Amino acid sequence: MRQGYAVLEQLKPTKHTNVIEVVKAAGIDVAEWEFKKNGERIANPSVNQSKIYRWSFGGDEEPSLLFIWHDSLTEDEQGHITYRNNLTKYIDHLANIASGVEKGNSNTARLRLERARLFREAVRQLYNSQKGCRVALLIPHSTESKEEDDTKSVKYRELDSEFWYVHHYDVFTGDIELIRGVQPRPHVEVVTFDDIYDPPKKKFSSGYSFHRSIEVKVKVLQRSGGRCEYCGQYGFKTPNDAYYLEVHHVVPLRYEGPDELWNTVALCADHHKQAHFGMSRTDILRGLLEFLGQLYPHKSNELKTGAEKIDWCNVDAFESLQS
């Protein structure tokens, strides 16, 4: 056995554990497995078709569980086990097959597309929260069978005893990195930034004021992963070695823009000031509307309508944003 690759070899599954048993062992409630989507009770929950083919489970108040092929892992000389992937490229590939742009089974692609999106969302939430997750490792019957039916292609499936942590999630490229048993350092400085450049018009006895949600600020900073959501560059480093960004409402509060995650971005200090005072502020506004429209497509029209109320912006520049 090669020196430095002992841990990876030891992690190789040797038993075929049913998906439901793995999920239960990870501490996730499986009561819903007794019922089909239409509410009909299932005699054998372990074969629930709406559950057993998923690649991720849990989340929110429950532990998170991800299913990962063992042969997709790497090990360094210190014995650190790492999983790297790019789900966005894979999701785009599946979407092309599902829509007929690329050759392939469109029905299978649509099913996998949903599973891949759920997996990516689970990774994103884990990255933002910096919580650990459980991982079930898989061994296929053969290299070819990995691309067939996901459950039938698995020869061995076992739950790893260690927690895994998401060290990298790039919202722009889709690159992800999970490391076994190694907790990540804080990846973003959570700050409370009073947006003095955009006081809302509503005036109280104490002056211009507006209640800002701390939860929204924290979530947008976590979503950014330390990168400006306009230029993609990391914010400058603070004394505690975290990244500094500023929270910005794309449709300003004084134009009745909502204090919601879908109207809020994290910007580097330079682009935050440019978004308010720069000659390119309309271009920045357009770029941010496109960015948020991709993340929250059901809010794209509302964002565009709100932006059209801004007296300094060029409304004609937003024509192509109509969904």
Image (spheres, rainbow, N blue to C red):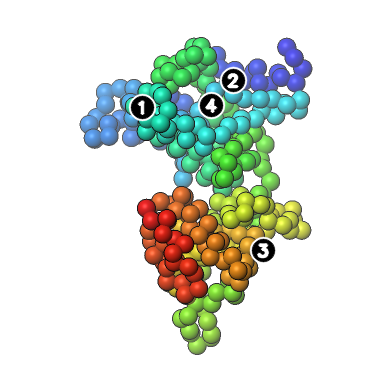
Q: Confirm whether residue 299 shows in the render.
A: no
Q: Residue at x 42, y 71 (%)?
A: 309
Give above or below for 248 relative to 25. Answer: below
N-terminal of the two: label 3 or label 1?
1
The label nearer to you, 4 versus 1, is: 1
Q: Please tell me whether mark 1 sits on a helix, a strand or a loop.
A: helix
The residue identified by callout 2 is: 71
Mark 3–mark 4 Cα distance, whole angstroms, equals 40 Å
Q: Residue at x 50, y 53 (%)?
A: 291
Q: Residues within 10 Å of mark 2 (few under 14, many from 20)?
A: some
The label nearer to you, 1 versus 2, is: 1
Give above or below for 256 relative to 68. Answer: below
The residue identified by callout 3 is: 270
Q: Mark number for residue 128?
A: none
Mark 3–mark 1 Cα distance, whole angstroms, equals 45 Å
User: What amino acid is at disc 2?
Assistant: Asp
The residue identified by callout 1 is: 106
Give above or below for 282 relative to 181. Answer: below
N-terminal of the two: label 3 or label 4?
4
Mark 1–mark 2 Cα distance, whole angstroms, equals 26 Å
Mark 2–mark 3 Cα distance, whole angstroms, equals 43 Å
Q: Please tell me whether mark 2 sits on a helix, a strand or a loop.
A: helix
User: What amino acid is at disc 3?
Assistant: Asp
The label nearer to you, 3 versus 4, is: 3
Mark 4–mark 2 Cα distance, whole angstroms, equals 9 Å
Q: Residues within 10 Å of mark 1 (few under 14, many from 20)?
A: some
Do the numbered discs 1 and 2 sit on residues whose CB atoms are within 8 Å?
no
Q: Position of residue 135 (x, y in %)?
A: 54, 30
The residue identified by callout 4 is: 68
